[in-house]
Amino acid sequence: MSGSNSNPSLQVTVSSKQILAISLPIALAIMVPQVNFVINNIFLGALSSEALAIGGITGVFYLIFGVMGQGLNNGLQALISRRAGENRVDEIGVLFNQGVIISILLSVIAIAFTYFIAPSIFHSVLHDTQRANSVIEFLKIRIWGIPFLFIYQMRNALLVGTNQSNFLIIGTATEAAFNIFFDYCFIFGHFGFTAMGLNGAAYASIISEVMGLFVIYLVIHYQKIGARFELFKNFEIKWDYIKLILVQSSPIMMQYMISIISWEIFYILIEHRGEQTLAVSNSMRNIFGFFGSFTWAFAATSNTMVSNIIGQNMQDKVIPLINKIAKWSFGFAFCVCIILNVFAHQFLSIYGQGEGFMQEGIPVLRVASIALLLMSIATIWLNGVTGTGQSKINLAIEFVAIIIYLIYAYLTIEYYQFPITIGWMCEIIYWLTLLIPSYLYIKSYRWKDKKI
């Protein structure tokens, strides 16, 4: 099978054309659910500012588990890309199947944690008891979407790792369409449905994740991707592959989890400052996610292309490749930041929260836009480290950055009670702390003999 000439080569070339061919479909695929999140919060903002504030806390909590799947996805993607570069196509399906098995087990852990541990945590850390109850009720519904999200993320690893990222948009567009429709129906009670308020958003999200997963696997089937890589042929547990995937993925999973946990702590500190400040920060998360879509797409491209060309024994091309990707990423981010700052009032007005919200939000938006520029470079170099197979280095870099981030956030937001604009500067510090060691490590060439 791996030697079939009827199938296109899975090996990449170091060129801007190849970079854009991989990254632009990923960007669209990432942007669609971010549009989804923004519209979700517009609906919640129309419901009440309290609902918008709760949406920030619950959204970040769900992300903690979502990034477990993303970490597994990134580790699996690096492995699939390496096998593609080595032209060992017969192993790609095996890796994918074992990734699906791991994702199912992780979803069981996530559901159990949400039901049995999370309620105690939220009652301990949130000052408002009623808000804590609303958060817990929402999450006990929302968490049932996590198995579908995890398996859905495995298709990311497969499609990006095999240079077929153009198919990503189909599943994400389906997911967004269903989520917007059912948000409108369930939150407000349109088209004969019962108005469920905040919890309606949870049910809508679950339905959309199920439908996105269903459609993307139809694509995999009808495009004969499943047949080429023998997906779903044998779901027997292969412990050597399970170990390989976990060795590569678990540091990235931990890296992402501590990153999002720190963001949840940040939101808890913000919650102590009041409802409007929390709502402003939630809107910043939406803007960060939506306009960071191109950056994350280029980051995924850095991961897969670095791993692929190392598989082709072209280690000397790694740094020129990362530099090329970083230039594209920064260029897109620079354009985004100009648009954000010129039209800041218009972007924030979509949440319908009034002039006080605007006055507090616009300075924060200015700070967030600077952080977006730093992120556009830092994530490229950090994901380059992932592509080399040195995921433990990623974890070490992330751990140091998070410690600095949390110390700064606590001192500025909680201890000294500085304006929220000062607190949001922790994002600038965070991305700088990720960029510098990632850049220095890649430049050191200590990764060049790493085999995965």
Image: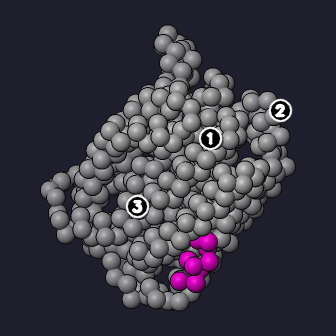
Q: Residue 362 in the image: x percent, y percent?
A: 80, 45
142 versus 199 height, above or below: below
Residue 202 as seen in the image, left or right of residue 47: left
The residue where tag 3 is placed is 253
Crowding at label 3, few (<14), some or many (≥20) Cα neighbours within 10 Å?
Answer: many
Say which quarter of the image contains residue 214. top left
Q: Looking at the image, which residue is at 61% across and 47% down?
A: 269
Q: Earlier in the sequence, mark 3 or mark 1?
A: 3
Q: Is residue 55 above or below residue 182?
A: below
The residue wearing badge 1 is 271
* Residue under label 2: 355
Q: Are marks 3 and 1 in contact (CB under 8 Å)?
A: no
- Can residue 350 be found in the magenta stretch? no
Q: Nearer the viewer, mark 3 or mark 1?
A: 1
Q: Amino acid at mark 1?
A: Glu
Q: Are marks 2 and 3 in contact (CB under 8 Å)?
A: no
Q: How far, Cα to Cα, is label 2 from label 3?
A: 40 Å
Position of 81 with respect to 233 (left or right) is: right
Query: How many marks on residues?
Result: 3
